[in-house]
Image: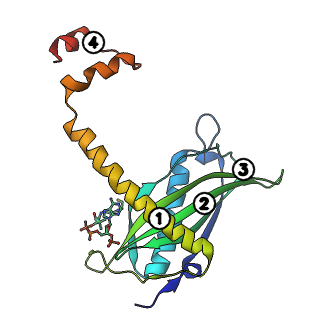
Amino acid sequence: MTAKPVSHSRTTLTELMIPSYANFGGKIHGGILLSLMDKVAYACAAKHAGQYCVTVSVDGVNFKQPVEVGELVSLLASVNYVGRTSLVVGIKVIAENVKFGTVKHTNTSYFTMVAKDDDDRPTEVPPLLLETTDDVRRFLEAMERKHLRAAYSEGFDKARTRLLLEENVDKLTSERCQITDELRNELP
Ligand SMILES: CC(C)(COP(=O)(O)OP(=O)(O)OC[C@H]1O[C@@H](n2cnc3c(N)ncnc32)[C@H](O)[C@@H]1OP(=O)(O)O)[C@@H](O)C(=O)NCCC(=O)NCCS
């Protein structure tokens, strides 16, 4: 397969934040931004893959600052990494107040997408042609996150399935929770 450059699939989506996107506090719902991120990730991944793609996982969604009604949100997406059938799309989200000329960086997140063939099976994607030092840095960083993620997932699964109540229930004493008297009698 011929490698495709990052520039081939770089995608920007800009959308005006309208009142119906806001929560009761007047700020934009995080879910609206997530939906836009999913959309731009799809567009970027599908352009690179030349195939239909699905979202498999999302990393690094931490909204650092609220987005307001009336701001223009731009999502800048590029393929950071490709595996055999998967791609990592990095998305930088910025919100612009055109009246005051201010721009804030709300978050940078990473969507892992997988290309699917007509039978819904994962299918190979073209290699990525790295043309700039930023392309190289992003590819290496995605490799590092992949390793960290694998270690985290293993720990997370163990914590979910193997945590024994009798060995851990004391940890709750310093937390902001209460156990009912009835339940306390049942616990080991
Ligand atoms: C993701 C999916 C295709 C994996 O299928 P699978 O039969 O396990 O296929 P594979 O094991 O060959 O994995 C395919 C690729 O996905 C990657 N992958 C699978 N699970 C992953 C995860 N949780 N996080 C990151 N990558 C993952 C694999 O590393 C592999 O990448 P590679 O080919 O580049 O090495 C399958 O689970 C799926 O279709 N999920 C539903 C996705 C979807 O519909 N999303 C929309 C939301 S409703």
Residues at discs 2 and 4 in contact (Cβ within 8 Å): no
Q: Earlier in the sequence, mark 2 or mark 3?
A: 3
Tell me if residue 151 comes above or below residue 132 in the rendering: above
Amino acid carrying mark 1 in the image: Ala
Report helix, strand or loop for mark 3. Answer: loop
Q: Is residue 88 something that shows in the picture?
A: yes
Q: Between 161 and 72, which is closer to the camera in this rendering?
A: 161
Q: Which residue is mark 1?
A: 142
Asked if disc 2 and disc 1 are in contact, CB closer than 8 Å, the reply is no
Of 146 and 88, the residue lying toward us: 146
Q: Tell me: is circle 1 under 8 Å from ligand 1.
A: no
Nearer to us in this view, 182 or 27: 182
In the picture as drawn, the residue positioned furthest to the bottom comes out as 2
Q: Which residue is mark 3?
A: 70
The kind of residue on which mark 3 rests is: Gly
**Residue corresponding to mark 2:** 92
Q: CA distance from mark 2 to mark 1?
A: 15 Å
Residue drawn at x 37%, y 18% as measured from the top left = 177
* Label disc, if present, on residue 180 of the rendered structure: 4
Mark 4 residue element = loop
Nearer the camera: disc 2 or disc 3: 2
In three-dimensional space, the C-alpha distance between marks 3 and 4, rounded to whole angstroms, equals 47 Å
- Residue 48 position in % (x across, y down): 48, 79
- Mark 1 neighbour class, 10 Å CA radius: few under 14, some 14 to 19, many 20 or more: many
Q: 19 or 12, which lies in front?
A: 12
Circle 4 packing at 10 Å, graded few (<14), some (14-19), many (20+), is: few
- Badge 2 local density, few (<14 within 10 Å), some, or many (20+)? some
